[in-house]
Image (cartoon, rainbow, N blue to C red):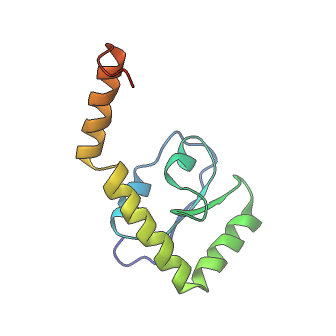
Amino acid sequence: MERCAITALPYLSASQSGVIPTAFAFGKPVVATAVGGIPDMVRDRITGLLVPPNDPESLRAALKELMHDPGLRKKLGQAGKEFAAAELSWDSIARKHVDFYRHFIGENKQ
């Protein structure tokens, strides 16, 4: 992962991906298909590029765009790294679980 410039994930279907948080941790931009829960992490043009599933032309165009635009690669990679630190860290996950359970049992009346 350290040596890659772009992480490409052309899923036809997926509920989630463990590769995306890994790419984000390394500050790598992601090109992925907009299936399942993938758009929850890969936010188009924010933390990566999303393309329709089973659309090789869109995938090619997105990869080509990133290959020819090092500034965009860096911007998306940095945004992914920040997203992972804020939303996918153990502290964040634990806080979300505690908030959910407090709300569930009625202690969090916001």
**106 lies above or below 58:** above
Q: Which quarter of the figure is the C terminus placed in?
A: top left
- Judge by depth and name the residue closer to the eye, 1 or 26: 26
**71 lies above or below 39:** below
Residue at the extreme top of the image, as rendered:
105
All told, the count of numbered labels is 0
- 18 to the left or right of 61: left
On the question of residue 28 being in view, the answer is: no
Give the x, y percent position of residue 85.
31, 57
User: Which residue sits at x=46%, y=78%?
Assistant: 74
Residue at the extreme front of the image, as rendered:
110
User: Which residue sits at x=28%, y=50%?
Assistant: 89
Give the x, y percent position of residue 1.
36, 70
User: Which residue sits at x=57%, y=49%?
Assistant: 39
Give the x, y percent position of residue 43.
56, 56
- 95 to the left or right of 7: left
**52 lies above or below 67:** above
On the question of residue 40 being in view, the answer is: yes
